[in-house]
């Protein structure tokens, strides 16, 4: 059963903790509830976005450094 | 009997209509970014319109009630859920002791206002309960609410308000293609004629740096300045002036690139020129802008600004009549 992880925040979505580092998660990786899968930058702060379920991250639905809106799907889990 | 904070969202603050009168000392008036929405929410539950409520930006908090109350959520479309069941925004509803209020994803706007019958009864500071976090003033111990906080609620609760609802035409919020009206100001002459035109022609986008102090905009053309020798006390950038007072709503454009509108928690002065001031009637709308949304600016004169202020007042009167 596919599960969608959504962003509660508007802003800019990032897959990496910083430009030089590896992404938090890659497609095909196993994630556990509570794992950080990305950051949303808004109001001069970076907010961690956590997985709200366990599963295998099948795809990211948004590119790195793209604008994001509240309720937008960030990733799909299987 | 208090309301317990279980989750606080990203930034949920206690706000009322603010503390005017101290700006000359550097303390901004603060208060709800969207005052109309807080007034509406308070009116729905039978509170004085100036009572303190919660301002939740982008995400709603999770709250537990310890006694019966009537509540309403107005402003941005931040759908409330009572014990997991969706409820209407802009509509008063009853809660019982033990009920949990949470929120769905924000659907439109930026800030939801939660009024609770009785009003939040934290100690006022300089005449207001509004949270000025940078100055550690008002709010809950001078800060935004956090999980574990117990919010005191006033004892004067109106009865029989559940089901009252603001008619659709009186629900004010941002629409796609929001237009903010600006009265050009003292330093308007400092930018070239072309920049005076393109500022109003260009479509601007709300930047991520958008908070209670100010809203930054990107995407329009950089401004060219009229040449001058910088006056004594001004910095070397052409956007610098000798330090001056910053009005609420003033539009400063550091280096002529990204306009910043100062809002309720504004700094009171500094050395950037201001091309004009957003009219008071449109300040609430700014508080409902999300990052990445498109905005245009429109030029108005003083008569048009005062007419808009009157229209806004009559809308508030219509709201009071509609739910009396």
Image (tube, coloured by chain):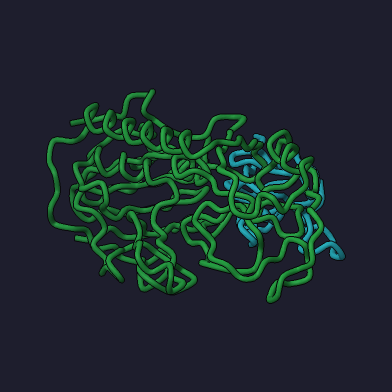
Chain identifier, colour green: B
Residue at 33% over, 31% down: B315
Q: Is residue B285 above or below residue B249?
A: above
Q: How many marks?
A: 0
Horizontally, residue A60 falls left or right of residue B125, namely right
Residue at the farthest right position: A20
Q: Position of residue B271 (x, y in %)?
A: 64, 68
Residue at 31% over, 29% down: B166
> Is any part of residue B233 visible from this angle?
yes
Q: Position of residue B307 (x, y in %)?
A: 41, 33
Q: Quadrant of residue B201?
A: top right
Q: Position of residue B114 (x, y in %)?
A: 35, 47
Q: Quadrant of residue B23?
A: bottom left
Q: Nearer the viewer, residue B74 or B135?
A: B135
The hue of chain A in the figure is: cyan
Quadrant for the C terminus of chain A, please: top right
Horizontally, residue B119 falls left or right of residue A23, namely left
Q: Position of residue B150 (x, y in %)?
A: 30, 65
Residue at 78% over, 70% down: B236
Horizontally, residue B302 falls left or right of residue B5, namely right
């Amino acid at each position: 059963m596919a599960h969608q992880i959504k962003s509660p925040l508007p802003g800019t979505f990032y897959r990496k903790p910083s430009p030089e580092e590896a992404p938090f998660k890659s497609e095909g990786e196993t994630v556990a509830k509570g794992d950080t899968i990305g950051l949303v930058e808004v109001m001069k702060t970076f907010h961690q976005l956590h997985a709200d379920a366990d599963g295998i991250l099948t795809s990211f639905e948004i590119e790195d450094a793209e604008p994001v809106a509240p309720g937008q799907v960030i990733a799909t889990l299987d | 009997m208090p309301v317990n904070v279980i989750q606080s969202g990203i930034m949920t603050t206690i706000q009322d209509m603010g503390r005017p009168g101290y700006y000359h000392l550097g303390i901004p008036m603060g208060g709800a970014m969207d005052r109309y929405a807080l007034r509406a929410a308070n009116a729905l539950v039978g509170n004085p319109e100036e009572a303190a409520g919660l301002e939740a930006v982008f995400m709603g908090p999770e709250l537990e009630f310890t006694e019966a109350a009537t509540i309403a959520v107005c402003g941005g479309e931040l759908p409330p859920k009572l014990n997991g069941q969706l409820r209407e925004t802009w509509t008063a509803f009853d809660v019982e002791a033990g009920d949990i209020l949470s929120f769905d994803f924000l659907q439109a706007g930026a800030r939801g206002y939660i009024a609770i019958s009785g009003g939040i009864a934290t100690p006022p500071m300089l005449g207001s309960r509004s949270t000025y976090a940078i100055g550690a003033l008002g709010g809950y111990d001078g800060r935004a609410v956090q999980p574990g906080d117990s919010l005191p609620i006033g004892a004067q609760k109106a009865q029989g308000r559940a089901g009252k609802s603001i008619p659709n035409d009186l629900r004010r919020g941002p629409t796609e293609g929001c237009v903010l009206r600006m009265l050009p100001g003292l330093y308007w002459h400092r930018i070239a004629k072309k920049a005076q035109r393109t500022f109003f022609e260009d479509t601007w986008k709300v930047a991520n740096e958008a908070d209670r102090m100010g809203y930054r905009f990107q995407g329009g053309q950089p401004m060219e300045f009229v040449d001058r020798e910088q006056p004594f006390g001004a910095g070397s950038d052409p956007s610098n002036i000798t330090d001056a007072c910053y009005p609420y709503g003033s539009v400063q454009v550091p280096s002529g690139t990204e306009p910043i509108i100062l809002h309720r928690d504004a700094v009171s002065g500094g050395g950037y020129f201001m091309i004009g001031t957003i009219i008071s009637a449109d300040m609430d709308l700014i508080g409902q802008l999300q990052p990445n949304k498109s905005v245009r600016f429109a030029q108005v004169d003083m008569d048009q600004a005062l007419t808009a202020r009157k229209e806004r007042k009559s809308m508030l009167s219509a709201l009071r009549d509609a739910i009396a």
